[in-house]
Amino acid sequence: ETGVTQTPRHLVMGMTNKKSLKCEQHLGHNAMYWYKQSAKKPLELMFVYNFKEQTENNSVPSRFSPECPNSSHLFLHLHTLQPEDSALYLCASSQEGSSYNEQFFGPGTRLTVL
Amino acid sequence: QKEVEQDPGPLSVPEGAIVSLNCTYSNSAFQYFMWYRQYSRKGPELLMYTYSSGNKEDGRFTAQVDKSSKYISLFIRDSQPSDSATYLCAMSASSGGSNYKLTFGKGTLLTVNP
């Protein structure tokens, strides 16, 4: 595996379900991000982890719960979601301390909440 | 006023045309400017990166930044059907040393017709 991988690629869940999204980066980076991409809206930064520590929570509802057990893995735990949470969820990673913050993105998980 | 404005298109051009994609922004602190390309069912990938004002050329692609007008552009010469994708502008206000946020535009959907 190379780059940034995400599983599952597609997820359909009911509002009462609990599911988790997984991201893994194979680039040796130390910063990881969750973004939400909705139609006709800019990418919305949700969470940032730097050396496994959460450094940004962009006013995300508590029904989204991130977890970063190590610098290579990032999870997004989902529970009691709403239909408006349906979107493409993108994971990204970057190298802290680089001259500019090039973020490498995974292919995303397409989430549909019924 | 939104921090970054980008016309979502869609934009449809014939093969070989010159394409111009643009973003305007309001935050004068932005100094790093990026263009990401996102193919269907894929995550965004960095296409061009520019620091402060000026031009940068890479093959058929030219990025321009005019900080006095708060306006950035991406030009694609001799456009090819393989250039068909969504193009996202992104910008940030600080450099390495600590994580920082990228602020994205909505993206412009480009189709190059053979």
Image (tube, coloured by chain):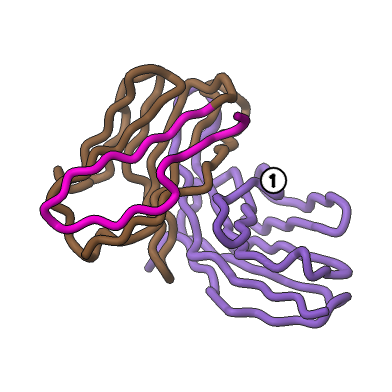
Q: Residue at x 17, y 54 (%)?
A: A81
Q: Does A13 lie within the magenta span?
A: yes
Instruction: Provide residue B40's location: percent of width, then percent of height.
Output: 58, 62
Q: How many circles with numbers are drawn on the protein?
A: 1
Q: Residue at x 50, y 52 (%)?
A: B28
Quadrant holding the N terminus of chain B: bottom left
Q: Which residue is mark 1?
A: B50
Label 1, secondary structure: give it: strand
Q: Amino acid at mark 1?
A: Thr
User: Does residue A64 lie above or below A96 as drawn?
Assistant: below
User: Does residue B79 lie above or below B31 as drawn?
Assistant: below
Quadrant holding the C terminus of chain B: bottom right
User: Does residue B54 lie above or below B83 as drawn?
Assistant: above
Magenta extent: A1-25
Q: Does B68 lie within the magenta span?
A: no
Instruction: Provide residue A3's location: percent of width, then percent of height.
Output: 60, 33
Q: Is residue B45 left or right of residue A70?
A: right
Color of chain A here? brown
Q: Tell which of B32 and A51 is nearer to you.
A: A51
Q: Quadrant of residue B22?
A: bottom right
Q: Quadrant of residue B85?
A: bottom right
Graded by Cα atoms within 10 Å as few (under 14), some (14 to 19) or many (20 or more), the crowding at tag 1 reads many
Color of chain B here? purple
Q: Residue at x 60, y 43 (%)?
A: B32
